[in-house]
Image (cartoon, grey):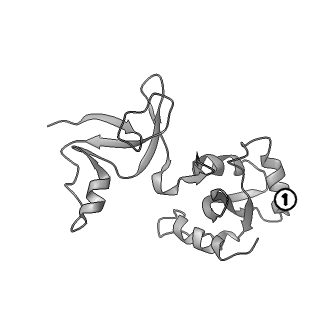
Amino acid sequence: MGSAPIRLLDDEGCEVPDGQPGELFSCGPYAFEGYWNLPEKTAEAFRGPYLSVGDMAIRDEHGFIRLIDRKKNMIISGGENVYPTEVDAVIAQHPDVKDVAVVGCPDPKWGERVSAAVALRAGAALSAEDLIVWSKDRLAGDKRPHEILFLSPERMPRNATGKILHRVLRDMMAACVF
């Protein structure tokens, strides 16, 4: 019993073309049959025998697949999909930034806005305005952070394995007035 080819699907369940992001679905004997007593969640996770665990990916013209983010972390701002991992990678290039995590915060006009939590390197003095201006040449307007919350590295919310807890970070950012 082998595995079927991986599929990258849009929200309607159609294959996306190479170079376009899609939700990654796989099929094989190792996949579980569903969530215990959660038929709605099971229906969301399956397209026929294909299962998704919520990863978004892009397939290149050579068939190589690159994971880009988790679907639940995707920010939808003004109808545009913004993948936080892409914004994280750019902001992390600033020489004063030690750590960064990007989340979507509710916005009455755009639906969600891009917000970043940043931990600076020891001795660095960088303002939110300076970092936003720095990002203008590196990120499209819909991907630039609208606000930046500076945290010490110890305050960046993480689980026991060190992964950023985006849900906790969204709550922290929603409680701040910028």
* Dot 1: element: helix
Horizontal side of residue 125 vs 59, given as left or right = right
In this view, 62 is above or below 41: above
Closest to the observer, 165 or 171: 171
Quarter of the rendering occupied by the C terminus: bottom right
Give the x, y percent position of residue 55. Answer: 42, 48
Residue at the (61%, 46%) spot, across then down: 86
Horizontal side of residue 44 vs 122, given as left or right = left
Quarter of the rendering occupied by the N terminus: top left
- Would you identify the image quadrant in which residue 124 lies? bottom right
Q: Residue furthest left?
A: 1
* Amino acid type, callout 1: Glu
Give the x, y percent position of residue 69. Answer: 50, 49
Residue 165 in view of the camera:
no
Q: How many marks?
A: 1
Q: Which residue lies furthest to the front in this view?
A: 109
Horizontal side of residue 59 vs 150, given as left or right = left
Give the x, y percent position of residue 106. Answer: 61, 65
Residue at the (81%, 61%) spot, across then down: 128
Which residue matches tag 1? 129
Residue at the (55%, 72%) spot, across then down: 168
Residue at the (85%, 56%) spot, across then down: 130
Could you classify mark 1 by the number of other residues whose Cα lies within 10 Å: few (under 14), some (14-19), or many (20 or more)? few
Give the x, y percent position of residue 19. Answer: 51, 30
